[in-house]
Image (cartoon, helix red, strand yellow):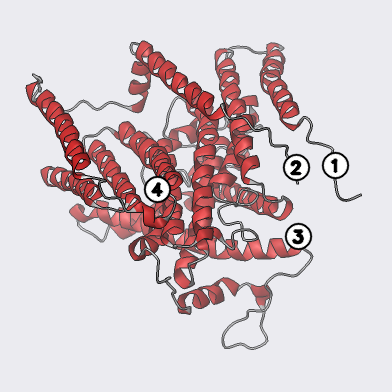
Amino acid sequence: MNAPANTNSLLERAPVMIRDWIIGFFPESLRWPVGALLAIAAMLAVFGLVFAFLTLAERKLLGRAQNRPGPNRSGLPFFRGTKLFGLTQPFADAVKMLTKEDIVPRAADHLLHFLAPVLVVAFALMTFAVIPYGRQLVAVDIDAGVLYFFAAGAATELAIFMAGWASHNKYSLIGAMRALAQLISYELPLLLSVVPVVMLAGTLSPTKIVEAQANVPGGLIPHWHVFTPWGAVGFAIFMVAALAEANRSPFDLPEGESELVAGHLTEYSGFKYALFFMAEYFGMIGLTGMGATLFLGGWQAPCAFLEFIPSYLWFGVKMLSLILFMMWIRATLLRLRIDQLTRLAWKFLVPLALINLGTAAFWSRTDSWSGPLQFVRWAIALALIVVPFVVIGRRLTAGLAPRTYRYAT
Amino acid sequence: MTAALILIALLILGSTAVAMSLRNLIHSALLLVLSWMGIAAFYLWAGAEFVAFAQVLVYAGAVSMIVLFAVLLTRRSRADLSIAPASLRRAVAGVLAGGATAGVLTLAVLRTNLQIAPSAAPTVTVQQLGLELIGPQVASVLVVGVILTVALLGAVVLAASDRNDGKEDAP
């Protein structure tokens, strides 16, 4: 690879160099499995820590949004009086979760009750394999990586169903049914929002999709998919559908703690509960990572002169800002009702995503337009997507607002 | 390679056999998902990456949901989930129908004069697959699309037959 000098810095190559250094200790026949194990270990360590501190960040942010300090008490074990702004809270939580009693309902389906948390984490972890975290940092570089990602992601909902059904609890079962309905509804817009990217990049491999968004040498404007009309709409649809796929507020109906106690989590305690929690955050990390890869240029720096910052840091920044955005949404929006949730998916997101396919097709056919025609291209592409958005939105909300209260004045 | 194939075959056959012998419908459905995953593993073994992931996405992701939904919505209670054949006649009829289907399929497989070339399996990239589907095979793709759309419209007609215009905020 003959990359430019500034993209070949020591920091950029550090992860690969460390891997090669460790692999070097092993004989030739063992190098491939050792490399794979190293990738798994690194991912578990990094994302385990990210998960731990994301829980803290979420609690702190929600606390701030609700005008309270959030967790700020936990200090260090042997230093009384140190508080560190509650930074050690995740470790205290981990110890608590590990030492709690594991309760299994007597009437539960014991095998499925045990398998569900294991599977949910396993499938969430599987999605990490194909995301390119940096210039050479991808665990498995396969041709159909995007498809693999969504296949593994779709299977997590099955594990949630298993959890809800095995608990032998009516709230859990309702949560499981909701999870199924939600998955069927939001899988479609999620995949449809990705199709334009695959169409325009001409590949299903995440690494090649990132390469398709590379900077023009010396360019100042990022060449990311999100800065095109179809990319912006696709990204918006992707994020909404990703919130639903990750069971995040405002689509956290399967949990719905105020109506369903905690849905599929009701009968889980201790470490199994922690595994579900972990899977939720892993799902969020995976989906935002894929979102950054598909629409925000993956590990690419926004402009060429910023490429001295290592690519994996850019990826981390993009992924974390998307996750923080999700937390912000959780702090702001109310939970939807199940009929509103499915209506939003089928009557709004799916038609928009289909129309967006047409916009993407127009964009790829007019690739040669330049000069003033560029403005025409932008105007037509935007009109193709904004007009249906307004029309469908108007039609769906007709007669719903302003809300009239029958029994209150 | 052959050992892996035998393992995959055992997984598919074993999970399907257990799924058929179990009385609990949910367990059967979940085991069926396992056998579909096994089929996906077989595709991976054969080098058909795209088909394997599509199999997982469609079968484990979507069809399984439909099956589970159908099971949960048609049973009244958990006790209802364990099913036994209603009568001996029914059981015999079921075995006969299943046996006939299996017989036809087996005969079809055995009688087909398949020309197996001894050469190595071709490696087809996803892009080639897509170009093939959009180019020479576009008619079949369109026909499949039309059939699925007709099925979808039929489902909508069936579901929309008993209308009830629930107002959004009826108390």
Q: Nearer the viewer, residue B77 or A281?
A: B77
First of labels 1, 4 by sequence position: 4
* Disc on res. A404: 1
Indicate the amino acid at tag 3: Ala
Q: Which residue is mark 3?
A: A65
Q: Position of residue B11 (x, y in %)?
A: 20, 48
Q: Looking at the picture, which amino acid does disc 1 mark?
A: Thr
Same-chain check, marks 1 and 4: yes
State which chain disc 2 sits on: B
Q: Position of residue A117 (x, y in %)?
A: 42, 61
Q: Seen in the image, is A109 located left or right of residue A399?
A: left
Please, is residue B88 above or below residue A378 in the view? below
Question: Within 10 Å of the Cα at label 1, are there few (<14), some (14-19), or many (20+) other Cα atoms?
Answer: few
Residue A145 is situated, as x and y percent measured from the top left of the image, at 40, 38
Rendered view: A372 above or below B45:
above
Q: Quadrant of residue A61?
A: bottom right
Q: Are marks 1 and 3 in contact (CB under 8 Å)?
A: no
Residue on which the image places disc 4: A129
The residue where tag 2 is placed is B169
In the displayed structure image, the side of residue A213 where residue A376 appears, left or right: right
Secondary element at tag 1: loop
Secondary structure found at label 2: loop
Mark 1, mark 4: which one is toward the viewer? 1
Q: Are marks 2 and 1 in contact (CB under 8 Å)?
A: yes
Residue A118 image position (x, y, % from top left): 38, 60
